[in-house]
Amino acid sequence: MIPWIKTYPTGNANISSRKGEASLVKRFTFKNADGTDYDITGYDFEYSFFRSNTLETLFFKLTVGDGLTIVNTNKLDVLISNPRSSRPVGNYFALLKDTENDHSWIAGIWELITGQSKRTYEDDETVTVNLSSGEEVTITVSIAGSGGTSVIWEDWDASTDILPVDPQVGIFYQATTNSTTLLLPDGGVVTAGTIITPKVANPGTDITVKANWAIISSMGY
């Protein structure tokens, strides 16, 4: 038998979401082979979700600022919100790609479930990616907030047309109502279901400033 040789750097990891609900924030932590942080600042990540691994039918794509957030230079937080999670129950294919360096990082199954899955889940999973540059990078996929770091969600009444009062780094604010004047970076208005989080202390009142605010999801309910 002639062996197959993989000539692309992708690691394999599977994730799961519940149909019609926002997922827990999944955190991808990047490390060098020696255990130091692998800096992903400025990387242009895309997490694409397809019908199958033939990549023929793209359902949706998460990007930095819309479902993806880079945290502390070496962590990528992933949030799949409703209505993106409202597809039929089943197994789909997910591919995390970095368009900045033109290669894929993670590929695997995206399982969409109702009720209780029959699968056995790990608290975290670590995969190794060997880059074309010769670098070896490990990526640990876990639930953001594990390992002693809490992730806090707070509801936010956007109908007041005022951002959350005294916003704190590490807290995710989800709009429960529509705004009429608060604008997103793409020029759209904040709607119910929009999730934002400050990147810095005292981020100001303009969420279009990407250095200060991250828009986790702007899909709405």
Image: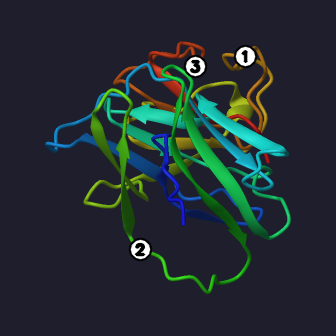
x, y percent for residue 55? 77, 45
State the residue in front, 161 or 48: 48
SS class, disc 2: loop
**Crowdedness of circle 2 by 10 Å Cα count: few (<14), some, many (20+)?**
few
Instruction: Give amino acid for label 2.
Output: Glu
In whole angstroms, how far apart are the C-alphas of marks 2 and 1? 37 Å
Which circle's residue, 2 or 3, is located before the other in the chain? 2
Whether tag 2 and tag 1 are in contact, CB under 8 A, the answer is: no
Vertical side of 202 occupied by 1: above or below: below
**Crowdedness of circle 1 by 10 Å Cα count: few (<14), some, many (20+)?**
few
Which circle's residue, 3 or 1, is located before the other in the chain? 1
x, y percent for residue 12? 49, 56
Q: Name the residue that disc number 1 marks.
A: 186
Query: At x 54% / y 24%, what residue is drawn?
Result: 102
Residue 207 numbered tag = 3
Which circle's residue, 2 or 1, is located before the other in the chain? 2
Query: At x 75% / y 56%, what residue is drawn?
Result: 85
Vertical side of 144 occupied by 20: above or below: below
State left or right for residue 182 relative to residue 124: right
